[in-house]
Image (spheres, rainbow, N blue to C red):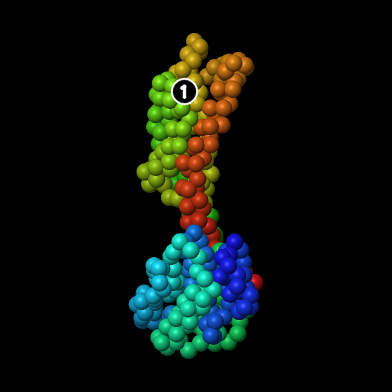
Amino acid sequence: MLSKGLQRFVLTEHWIKTETRIHGEYRGYWFNIAEEDRLTSFETVYPFTSDQLRALTLRLELTKLPKRKTEVIGNERAIALYIKGKEPLSYEEVIDVLKYFAAELAAIGIEQQLCCGSCGKPGKFPLSELGPEKTFPMCEPCFAQGQVDLLQAEAHLAKADFHYIRGTVGGLLGALLATIPWILLEQTGFIGALLAYFIGKGAFKGYVLTGAQIGPRTPRIIVAITGVLVLFAHLMALGVVIQPGYSWFSLRFARYLVTTSELSRAVWGGLAMGLFTAGLGVQRIILDIQEATAVPTLKRL
Ligand SMILES: [Zn+2]
C-alpha cells in the first residue's frame, strides 16, 4: 500500500503506479520510487559512465532532509537514493527529493533522460519492466538483447551444479543436531516444541557448511528437511517422556501414539506447535534465498 504522499504525487503528476512502486518522468528524467518498511528509494536507470556514477554518488550523498538519513547505492546501470525515517515521505518531501535528484543529474552533464535506460540512445521508447524492481524506457534492440541474455542466464542456471545432494546431507546433520535440545528438554517438562525454532536454522547452517551452492531448489530442500526433522524430534521427545516399551523411532510406536486417545492430543498438538515454531525460525532464511535466486524477468508494460 502506497503512502499518502506517494498517492497524491501519482495523481498530480500522472505517474504509473504498481502495488509498491510508482514510476514516471520528472523534468525530463525517469524515476522509480519504491516504499518498504521505513525506507523510500528513488532510482533512476541510465547507462552511467564510471565517472558520472562516482560524481553523482558523491553529490547525492549530500542530500539533506530534516530528520532523515540517506544512503546512495549505484551500479553502472542505475543509481538509487534511499531515504530512511519512521514516517513515510510527505508529498512535499517527494518533490524536494526529485527536484534535487534531477538537478544533480543535470549537474553531471546528463541533459535529459528521455532515452533508452539501457544504452542511452535518445528518444521516446516503450516502458519495460526488468523485474521485479526496475521499470524504465527501453529501445527495441536492447529489449531483444535483454531477452536473449535472460534466456541464456536461465539455461546456465538450469545446467549449473549446486551440489544439492551434498547440501542435503549437511542440512540433515545440522537439523539433527538442532533437535537435541528439544529431545532432552522435553523430559524436564519444558515446552520442547518451542525449541523447534532452531531446526530449520540448523538445516541451513549444515547445508552451507558443506560448501553446497545456494540455488533455486535450496528452499524446498531446507523446508523438507525441517518438516522431517520436526516429526523425528517430536517422536523422539515423546519417546523420552512416555517410554511405552517400544523402541523410540518405529512405526509401531507412531501407531501406538496416534491410536491411544489420551495421547493423541499431545501428539498432534506438539507436532503442530513444532512445525509452527520451526516455520518461524526458517521463514526469513527461505525468503532471503528466494529473493537472491529469483531469475529476473523482462517484459513490456
Ligand atoms: Zn537501448
Picture residue at 45% right of the left edge, 50% below the top: 214
Residue 56 picture quarter:
bottom left
Q: Is residue 231 above or below residue 152?
A: above
**Looking at the rendering, in which quadrant would you find the N terminus?**
bottom right
Query: Ligand 1 within 8 A of label 1's CB?
Result: no
Furthest residue toward top: 245
**Looking at the rendering, in which quadrant would you find the C terminus?**
bottom right
Closer to the camera in the image, 21 or 301: 21
Residue 241 image point, x, y percent = 46, 17
Compared across the picture, whether 83 is left or right of 300 comes to left
Let me know if residue 127 appears in the view. Answer: no
Picture residue at 48% right of the left edge, 67% below the top: 40
Closer to the camera in the image, 181 or 122: 181
Let me know if residue 16 appears in the view. Answer: yes
Compared across the picture, whether 152 is left or right of 190 comes to right
Residue 68 picture quarter:
bottom left
Find numbered disc 1 in the image and state the secondary structure of the residue it sits on. helix
Residue 97 image point, x, y percent = 47, 77
Picture residue at 48% right of the left edge, 63% below the top: 87
Residue holding disc 1: 237
